[in-house]
Image: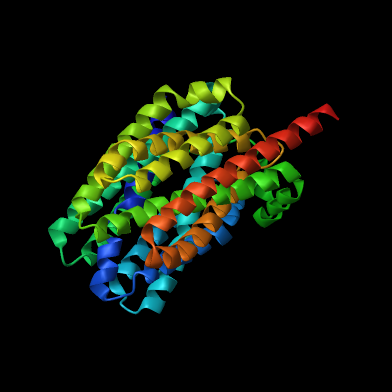
Amino acid sequence: MKKYISLLIAGLLVGITTNIGHPITPYYINQLGLDKIVFGYFFAAMSLGMLIFAPIWGALGDAKGRKWILIICLVFYGVGQILFGVLKNQYLIIAARLFSGIFSGGILVSFLSYMTRSKDLSKYNGPRLYATFISLQLVGTSLGSFIGGALGEVFNPNYHYVFFIQALSMLVFALYVLILMNFKDEEKLNVRSINPLKSLNDIKLLPISLVIFLFVIAVINISFTDVSKYLDVYFSDSGYGSLKLGTVNLIVGCLTLLVNLLFTPLIIKRFKPLLTLSILSIIGSAMLLLTFTLPNLLFNIYTFYMIFIITKAIIEPVIVEYLNEHKNIQSGILMGLRQSFISLGSIIGVLIGGVIYANSSVLLFYICSGMLGVAAVITIFIYIIKRRDSKI
């Protein structure tokens, strides 16, 4: 039970520490006098670092254990945030974002891969465990955004202080992992003696349906990334302050936790992941259209957008559950690939989103809705392929 609780607390800390700087980033960019499109470049640079290094961190964790991977990633992610707050040249900031992305990619990968293969944690309901972890991470995301928004009000116009506080929080988190967390009960850690990078050969074992599914993850994350990142900018452009944005994110986090504690494990247990994912994607697509088509943004945010958040909350544990069905592949590789394709979607989404948003902010959210529709169609196609193969 102690290990279970410490893991869930870590999920909360992941969300808080990695999101303190997000609400004030648009204001910080405006303060530096940079073009809004640079916001997309910064985020894409960070996602590129995650895309390249997430499977490597996963492989290193499979071979060497998770604890020191987590500590290294947390500390150097904090260093990257300090650089973000110190540097003023946009090209140097892009380099700092890339640096942060390299190390941030190992954090969630290490926790998820450990969670799916821990002997001590196997006695708990698997779907409920990582649904709860992801929920607490998202609650932490909301808390982190709320804290960041409040700190932005306090330190305005010295927004760079918020990044320094974020770096300090990452150091505290690293100490928490060092002192209070134990990762010595993982399955399949007999591979520690081999070259960890050789375990990347597990990628060759991926069936074609899983390869296609990884691209579905990227497509979904194009939508999720642009909605979350450009909703921040949209709020700023609509005249709302960072504290109001933080409040919305806090409500989002609480709703996500409630849904994943009460409903997600039951849905995962009773329905096939691929069918669940396709239905949720369709619902989420419709809710996005309503949110940004109808008048009265705040009303839409607290109604239709919250239904979209419910679908998003369930989709993420469903994806982990489907990946975890592939027991013949090392968990670090699977979760690393998940993070890489999430990052691929982030890169594509933010770079294209920046251009689209600069010309038509509402059009961007319509495209995000369309991406979820595309994901639903591809997921149904994968389901048909798997059913056909199972009958051969």
As displayed, is residue 36 above or below residue 64? below
As displayed, is residue 131 above or below residue 223? above
Any part of residue 4 in sight: yes
Q: Could you say which is closer to the camera, residue 12 or residue 280?
A: 280
Q: Could you say which is closer to the camera, residue 331 or residue 229?
A: 229
Residue 99, percent from left and from top: 45, 67
Farthest residue in the right direction?
392
Farthest residue in the front direction?
294
Any part of residue 185 in sight: no
The number of numbered badges drawn on the structure is: 0
Residue 46, percent from left and from top: 45, 63
Location of the N terminus by quadrant is: top left
As displayed, is residue 386 above or below residue 247? above
Snapshot quadrant of residue 308: top left
Q: Could you say which is closer to the camera, residue 260 or residue 35?
A: 35
Snapshot quadrant of residue 251: top left
Residue at position x 49%, y 64% in the image: 352
- Residue 41 falls left or right of residue 195: left
| Coloring applied to the structure | rainbow
Residue 203, percent from left and from top: 71, 50
Residue at position x 33%, y 52% in the image: 19
Farthest residue in the left direction?
154
- Residue 112 falls left or right of residue 147: right
Residue at position x 45%, y 56% in the image: 104
Residue 11, percent from left and from top: 40, 39
- Residue 170 falls left or right of residue 31: right
Location of the C terminus by quadrant is: top right
